[in-house]
Amino acid sequence: MNWLQDQAEKHEFATDYSIFLGSFSNSEAAQNMMSKRNPKFQSSDEDFDKATERVLAERSKVPSENIENITNTPHRRRRRVLNNQE
């Protein structure tokens, strides 16, 4: 598993370095390659407003008791107390 991870890291480094070197001669192609690796999604303001309205409409269907229980639940771990006997 460690060997495979090392190989994957070497491959990623070689790819990044190749894109870096290629960016000097063709910056558009390098930018295109990087965007394919980490795609970014965009939406218009209208699409965002529609999505927000849908979320708020669905949230209004849920009884308020359930929303309060969801938001007020404690998610913390408690440490176990150890008695030191020396």
Image (tube, helix red, strand yellow):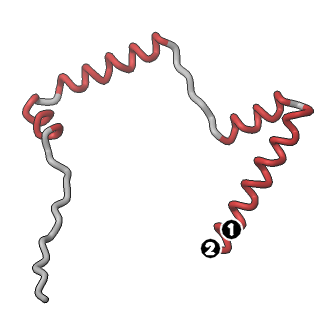
Please name the residue shown 19% across and 59% down the image: 77
Q: In what element is the residue under mark 2?
A: helix
Q: Position of residue 42 (x, y in %)?
A: 56, 22
Q: Look at the picture and state if 30 lies above or below 75.
A: above
Q: Is residue 7 left or right of residue 44?
A: right
In this view, the residue farthest toward the right is 25
Please name the residue shown 80% across and 48% down the image: 17
Q: Look at the picture and state if 84 lies above or below 2.
A: below
Residue contact between numbered discs 1 and 2, judged by CB atoms under 8 Å: yes
Residue under numbered circle 1: 6
Q: Is residue 55 left or right of residue 46?
A: left
Q: Is residue 12 left or right of residue 49?
A: right
Q: Position of residue 78 (x, y in %)?
A: 16, 61
The quarter of the picture where the C terminus appears is bottom left
In this view, the residue farthest toward the left is 65
Q: Which mark is residue 2?
A: 2
Q: Position of residue 21 (x, y in %)?
A: 87, 42
Q: In what element is the residue under mark 1?
A: helix
Mark 1 vs mark 2, CA separation in Å: 6 Å
Near mark 1 (Cα within 10 A), the count class, few <14, some 14-19 or many ≥20, is few
The quarter of the picture where the N terminus appears is bottom right
Near mark 2 (Cα within 10 A), the count class, few <14, some 14-19 or many ≥20, is few
Q: Look at the picture and state if 22 lies above or below 57.
A: below
Towards the viewer: 37 or 85:
85
